[in-house]
Image (cartoon, grey):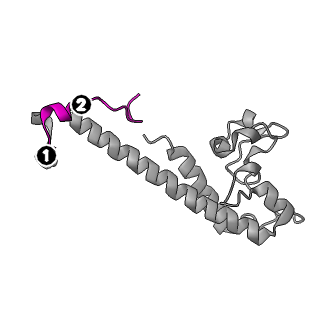
């Protein structure tokens, strides 16, 4: 199973929430929900910090911000390194949501491409490790000398 599957699903859920206007709906009638914190993806309870809550976004937070009380606010959203925190202070709700939307789409696309690459590498690796008689007839034949094919074994992420 690709390692990013869980985070991809979480980010897709967050993108749906954003697209449905989730950050525009004030449940208590007086303030807009906080990005990430007031969505269903946040496991944080009360005064716990994000690092204690087991947040799946933590891998996307720069190391120097992982101990912040709300670490997900420091994820760089674009090439300007704008974050939810910086856009809360300097941007509008529209600018914040636009930056978040673009970041979500870009990150989901990048992680899905990575998972496809890993799956392809694993498939090629498994085929190279099989004996010729085990390879299906519909699998393209590998070219090169047996010595070249048996070269040093590469360690792929799918191998533990």
Provide the major secondary structure of the magenta segment.
loop
| Magenta-highlighted residues | 142-160
User: Does residue 34 appear in this view?
Assistant: no
- Judging from the image, what secondary structure is the residue with disc 2 in? loop
Give the label on residue 141, or none. 1
Is residue 155 shown in magenta? yes
Tell me the quarter of the picture where residue 28 sits.
bottom right
- Judging from the image, what secondary structure is the residue with disc 1 in? loop
147, above or below 105, in the image:
above
Residue 155, horizontal then vertical, whole percent = 37, 31
Point 73% across, 35% down: residue: 51
Residue 52, horizontal then vertical, whole percent = 74, 33
Point 22% across, 38% down: residue: 127
Q: Classify the position of the N terminus by image quarter.
A: top left
Is residue 53 shown in magenta? no
Q: Nearer the viewer, residue 4 or 154?
A: 154
Residue 4, horizontal then vertical, whole percent = 51, 44
CA gap between label 1 and label 2 equals 17 Å
Q: How many marks?
A: 2
**Image check: 124 left or right of 89?**
left
Query: Which residue is denoted by mark 2 in the rendering?
Result: 151
């Amino acid at each position: 199973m690709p390692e990013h599957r869980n985070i991809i699903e979480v980010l897709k859920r967050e993108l749906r929430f954003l697209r449905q206007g989730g950050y525009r709906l004030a449940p208590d009638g007086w303030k807009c929900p906080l990005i990430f914190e007031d969505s269903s993806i946040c496991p944080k309870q009360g005064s716990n910090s994000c690092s204690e809550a087991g947040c799946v976004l933590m891998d996307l937070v720069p190391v120097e911000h992982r101990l912040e009380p709300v670490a997900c606010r420091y994820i760089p959203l674009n090439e300007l390194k704008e974050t939810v925190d910086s856009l809360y202070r300097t941007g509008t709700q529209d600018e914040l949501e636009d930056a978040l939307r673009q970041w979500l789409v870009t990150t989901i696309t990048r992680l899905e491409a990575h998972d496809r690459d890993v799956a392809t590498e694993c498939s090629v690796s498994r085929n190279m490790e099989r004996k010729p008689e085990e390879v299906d007839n519909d699998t393209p034949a590998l070219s090169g000398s047996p010595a070249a094919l048996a070269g040093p074994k590469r360690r792929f992420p799918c191998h533990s």
